[in-house]
Image: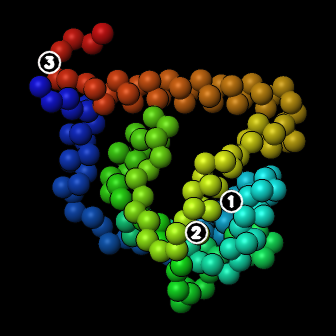
Amino acid sequence: MATQSPFSFLEGLLQQLPHPKLAPPDWAVSEVQHRIVLLLNHVLMQEAEATARLARQKGRVILVQWRLFSFKLQATPAGLLDLAAPEAKADLVLTATEESPLAMAQAALRGDKPAVRIEGDVQLAAEVNWLTEHVRWDVEEDLARILGDVPARVMCQWTLNMVMALRQFASKASTFVPGQAAR
């Protein structure tokens, strides 16, 4: 018997609804992209090896896309990222292949990396892969600067417990079989 998520009905229903032709204004898209770049650079600056690797790729352009969303990043001489000009030719294209936001969220809760189609420069792709494998945001340290050590530790531990519970729920939901009793 095939296993089916209890959320598959909801996902199927959402896909059948007509998609409105609403698009966020250009200024909002630009602001979100700039905030993403600021966050990525904040995380990169915490790892000297990451900035050294990116500095070797200065001027290279990475196009990141998922469904209708996309933006281009360019490696700077300082080893950080900046938004590339819209007309810049991408050296590397990273496309998330999972179309369903719900499936992507479930995968993220399980701790899985999204499936990505990679096209372009192999060396740049290797550097981006190294960054995704080795660079992590130390959220607790950033919170400790604002709140203090103990509140930051408690908040991060509480969040970690919640994420673990959500992962456990997501793994059980993905193996749910209608008509069988819960264990």
Q: Where does residue 61 sit, x and y in percent of width and height?
A: 59, 78
Which residue is label 1 attached to? Answer: 40
Specify the amino acid type for callout 2: Gln
- Depth check, front residue: 55 or 76: 55
Circle number at residue 179: 3
Which residue is label 2 attached to? Answer: 123
Q: Bin the neighbour count of mark 1 within 10 Å (Cα to Cα): few under 14, some 14-19, many 20 and up.
A: some
Instruction: Assign the N terminus to one quadrant of the image.
Output: top left
Q: Where does residue 167 sit, x and y in percent of width and height?
A: 46, 29
Residue at image location 35% in from the left, 24% down from the top: 172
Specify the amino acid type for callout 3: Gly
Question: In the image, which is nearer the foreground, mark 1 or mark 2?
Answer: 2
- Depth check, front residue: 48 or 69: 48
Q: CA distance from mark 3 to mark 2?
A: 50 Å
Mark 2: which secondary structure? helix
Specify the amino acid type for callout 1: Leu
Q: CA distance from mark 1 to mark 3?
A: 45 Å
Mark 3: which secondary structure? loop
- Is residue 81 shown above or below 60? above
Question: Is there any visible trace of residue 84 in the rendered image?
Answer: yes
Q: Are marks 3 and 2 in contact (CB under 8 Å)?
A: no
Give whichever of discs 1 and 2 has the lower sequence position: 1
Q: Where does residue 65 sit, x and y in percent of width and height?
A: 45, 68
Horizontal side, residue 170 vs residue 140: left or right: left
Q: CA distance from mark 1 to mark 2?
A: 20 Å
